[in-house]
Image (cartoon, helix red, strand yellow):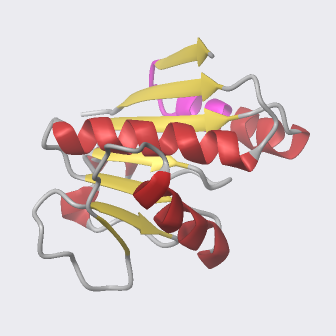
């Protein structure tokens, strides 16, 4: 079965805005009991997301870990990583990287977060076309 793909086009032009939105999506997935993976382009981005998940909302708690080949103890902790998501954590896939997720057919939903940065938009357009070529229906939301 093909996943639901949602592109969120944010009005800002900042990595911080995309990261904050990713934290909100991850929090919602956690509260609903879904396993969630946040895909980052590099280790630095993963570490910034790790720090932000502790502080993005005053009363929020989202258990999370940076993925390094060992799975967290908590069943639905959010995983942040730069590599392929572990199979069990592919239900909700938040893509902050510039590449198409691996094994997308194993995800139930994929969230693509873009902002007004031209590099981000170009990479997003390429992923959009790749999803279309796979026959996936795409929903786009302008925020």
Residue drawn at x 45%, y 45% as measured from the top left: 23
Q: Quadrant of the N terminus?
A: top left
Can residue 102 be seen by looking at this rendering? no
Q: Nearer the viewer, residue 49 or 128?
A: 49
Residue 39 screen position, x and y as percent: 50, 59
Taking the image as shown, residue 17 lies to the left or right of residue 80, namely right
Rendered image quadrant of residue 65: bottom left
Residue drawn at x 29%, y 54% as measured from the top left: 62
Count the marks.
Answer: 0
Give the main secondary structure, helix, strand or loop, of the magenta stretch: helix
Q: Nearer the viewer, residue 37 or 63?
A: 63
Residue drawn at x 33%, y 33% as measured from the top left: 3
Residue drawn at x 41%, y 60% as measured from the top left: 54
Residue 18 screen position, x and y as percent: 63, 41
Q: Nearer the viewer, residue 58 or 83?
A: 58
Residue 17 screen position, x and y as percent: 67, 39
Taking the image as shown, residue 94 lies to the left or right of residue 97, namely left
Q: State which region is magenta.
A: 128-137
């Amino acid at each position: 079965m093909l996943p639901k793909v949602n592109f969120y086009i944010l009005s800002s032009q900042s990595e911080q805005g995309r990261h904050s939105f990713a934290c909100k999506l991850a929090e919602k997935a956690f509260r609903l009991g879904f396993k969630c993976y946040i895909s980052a382009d590099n280790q630095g981005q993963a570490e910034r997301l790790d720090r932000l998940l502790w502080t993005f909302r005053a009363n929020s708690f989202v258990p999370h870990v940076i993925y390094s080949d060992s799975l967290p103890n908590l069943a639905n902790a959010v995983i942040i990583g730069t590599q392929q998501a572990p199979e069990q954590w592919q239900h909700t896939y938040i893509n902050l990287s510039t590449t198409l997720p691996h094994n997308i057919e194993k995800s139930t939903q994929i969230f693509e977060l873009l902002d007004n940065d031209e590099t981000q938009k170009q990479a997003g357009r390429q992923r959009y076309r790749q999803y279309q070529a796979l026959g996936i229906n795409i929903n786009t939301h302008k925020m």
